[in-house]
Image (spheres, rainbow, N blue to C red):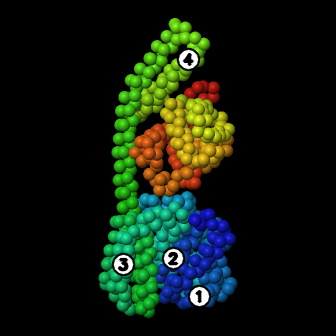
């Protein structure tokens, strides 16, 4: 369960307790009895909490700071000054958290090298600014000896910076169910034990008996970091860097190494983190590119197969239509008795359906060969009504209840045939899914919503795209299946080719829209397309909104 889904009555006390624990565990080699230590991971925890909760995190963070000053350090600055200093830390780091939230929107902080670089710049600038003000307040209060201001600014600022750089990635991963799941799937392997064992051996070799600053073989620490980064990407690196930092701090404290050059340790921690994270993100990006290339090749193969099938089906469909028209002429010229009108209607429906199928096949063939689309304004209500009527017989046959909610009076700019194909595919999948349920529990619901450019619900007249949702009472989509659902030749049905959703997504993306499935206990598929709007009032000419 993520921090977002926990009730506030549990989330805030848990944060406060963990923050104070971090403060106590890293209260190593302080200056003047103050919170001036070589490594401060607690601000990283606070920033992650701020990204999740915004300014609501201010009060629990302030309480955590006050408790840390009281329980860990005995409040050396006195109550009044401690209240003031803690207030500044909350404001300063709150501003840093607000900048991070504005830059990354509460997600995707470590998705690329560019974002990593932005994150490092924001963290370095924010922590140093916060540090200068904090140390100035301590200096004005007489708690820092004259002439030591620069030294304590560097020590505290670098300590906060290193603590955030080293700790925040792992804490961010642990803050959400998705991040924890990905972290577990990445590092829950036997190989992880290998590089963790190597890290322990290297730590013992470099820092096991250290009493002075002569740790000459520090470069061995890069071996487990490189191993983790090259094999498990950014997630493995985040775990490795955090473990190394914990090990270094524990061994230095265990050996009572008072003659350690703190700045050297701090820079070593920072370089381990930055080198490891850079390598890990590069590895992740290369893997994404490789997977995208494989997906493109599979999609190209699926497109070739679809085009070939369309070519092969076109001729028999044309022949079927011709035979149907011949039957229609024979019925008109021959007395077929009382059932003649019924037979004629059946033949006409057969001709209409064969024509529709031929049109679908022809348009699909053109789409996969040249990307051709015949864009026109498609009314949402008409689209849903047209497609759902094609399933009435099957729905009645299998005892499935179809609920179509009121459709907004909106038009999408799309190729009608292609979009109908996508919606028909989603309804067909939903129909297959609900048949596993007992009678009376087979339900499908169709709904439409107006969204803004950021994918949020919008009021009338304020949206830029329309979202159609197909929800069913089937068993739903798991996180594992969701990751592979839109890969070619992957199907949950024994007789499925695994092409329907792949081709549907290709069509939607060609329209500038999207198609996705949501993880849940019941099936939820959503498709979004840009709205159509008239260029000039009163003219039948449309463009995408």
**Residue pointed to by mark 4:** 343
Q: CA distance from mark 3 to mark 2?
A: 24 Å
Q: Nearer the viewer, mark 1 or mark 4?
A: 4
Q: Are marks 1 and 3 in contact (CB under 8 Å)?
A: no
Extreme-front residue of the structure: 337
**How dense is the environment of label 1, judged by Cα within 10 Å: few (below 14), some, or many (20 and up)?**
some
Q: CA distance from mark 3 to mark 4?
A: 79 Å
Residue 21 visible, this angle? yes
Whether residue 198 sits left or right of residue 338 in the image: it is: left
- Image coordinates for residue 177, horizontal then vertical, percent: 54, 63
Q: CA distance from mark 1 to mark 4?
A: 93 Å
Residue in the foreground of this view, choosing between 482 and 322: 322
Residue 529 visible, this angle? no
- Image coordinates for residue 322, horizontal then vertical, percent: 44, 17
Q: Earlier in the sequence, mark 2 or mark 4?
A: 2
**Residue pointed to by mark 2:** 41
**How dense is the environment of label 4, judged by Cα within 10 Å: few (below 14), some, or many (20 and up)?**
some
Q: CA distance from mark 2 to mark 4?
A: 80 Å
Instruction: Give the quarter of the image for residue 349.
Output: top right
Residue positioned 34% across, 70% down in the render: 227
**How dense is the environment of label 2, judged by Cα within 10 Å: few (below 14), some, or many (20 and up)?**
many
Question: In the rendering, which numbered label is found on residue 73?
Answer: 1
Quadrant of the image containing the N terminus:
bottom right
Residue in the foreground of this view, choosing between 442 and 203: 442
Quadrant of the image containing the C terminus:
top right
The residue tagged with tag 3: helix, strand or loop? helix
**Residue pointed to by mark 3:** 197
Question: In the rendering, which numbered label is found on residue 227?
Answer: none
Say if 480 sits above or below 406 in the image. below
- Image coordinates for residue 501, horizontal then vertical, percent: 47, 43
Q: Earlier in the sequence, mark 3 or mark 4?
A: 3
- Image coordinates for residue 323, horizontal then vertical, percent: 44, 17
């Amino acid at each position: 369960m993520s921090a977002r889904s926990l009730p506030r009555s549990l989330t805030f006390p848990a944060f406060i307790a963990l923050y104070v624990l971090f403060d106590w565990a890293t209260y190593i080699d302080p200056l003047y009895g103050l919170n001036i230590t070589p490594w401060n991971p607690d601000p990283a925890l606070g920033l992650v909490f701020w990204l999740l909760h915004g300014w609501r995190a201010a009060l629990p963070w302030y309480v955590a700071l006050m408790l840390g000053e009281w329980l860990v350090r005995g409040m050396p600055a006195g109550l009044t000054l401690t209240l003031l200093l803690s207030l500044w830390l909350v404001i300063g780091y709150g501003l840093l958290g607000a900048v991070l939230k504005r830059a990354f929107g509460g997600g995707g902080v470590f998705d690329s090298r560019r974002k990593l670089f932005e994150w490092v710049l924001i963290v370095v600038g924010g922590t140093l600014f916060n540090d200068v003000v904090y140390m100035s307040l301590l200096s004005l209060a007489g708690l820092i000896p004259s002439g030591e201001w620069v030294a304590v600014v560097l020590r505290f600022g670098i300590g906060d910076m290193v603590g955030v750089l080293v700790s925040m990635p792992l804490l961010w991963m642990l803050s959400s169910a998705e991040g924890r799941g990905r972290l577990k799937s990445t590092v829950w392997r036997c190989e992880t034990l290998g590089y963790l064992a190597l890290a322990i051996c290297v730590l013992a070799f470099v820092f096991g008996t250290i009493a002075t600053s002569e740790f000459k073989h520090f470069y061995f620490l890069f071996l487990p970091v490189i191993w983790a980064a090259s094999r498990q990407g950014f997630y493995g690196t985040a775990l490795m860097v955090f473990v190394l930092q914990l090990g270094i701090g524990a061994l230095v404290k265990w050996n009572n190494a008072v003659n350690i050059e703190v700045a050297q340790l701090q820079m070593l921690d920072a370089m381990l983190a930055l080198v490891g994270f850079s390598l890990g993100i590069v590895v992740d990006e290369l893997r994404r590119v490789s997977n995208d290339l494989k997906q493109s090749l599979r999609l190209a193969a699926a497109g070739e197969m679809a085009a070939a099938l369309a070519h092969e089906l076109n001729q028999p469909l044309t022949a079927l239509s011709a035979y149907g028209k011949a039957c229609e002429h024979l019925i008109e010229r021959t007395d077929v008795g009382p059932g003649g009108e019924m037979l004629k209607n059946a033949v006409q429906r057969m001709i209409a359906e064969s024509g529709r199928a031929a049109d679908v096949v022809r348009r699909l063939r053109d789409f996969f060969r040249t990307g051709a689309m015949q864009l026109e304004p498609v009314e949402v209500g008409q689209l849903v009504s047209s497609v759902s009527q094609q399933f009435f017989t099957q729905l009645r046959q299998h005892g499935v209840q179809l609920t179509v909610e009121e459709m907004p009076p909106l038009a999408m700019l799309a190729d009608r045939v292609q979009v109908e194909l996508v919606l028909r595919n989603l309804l067909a999948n939903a129909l297959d899914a609900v048949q596993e349920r007992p009678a009376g529990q087979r339900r499908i619901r169709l709904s439409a919503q107006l969204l803004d450019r950021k994918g949020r619900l919008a009021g009338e007249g304020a949206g830029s795209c329309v979202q159609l949702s197909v929800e069913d009472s089937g068993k739903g989509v798991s996180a594992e299946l969701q990751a592979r659902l839109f890969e070619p030749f992957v199907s949950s049905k024994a007789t499925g080719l695994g092409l329907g959703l792949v081709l549907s997504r290709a069509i939607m993306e060609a329209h500038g829209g999207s198609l996705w499935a949501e993880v849940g206990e019941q099936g939820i598929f959503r498709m979004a397309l840009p709205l159509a709007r008239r260029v000039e009032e009163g003219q039948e000419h449309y463009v995408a909104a």
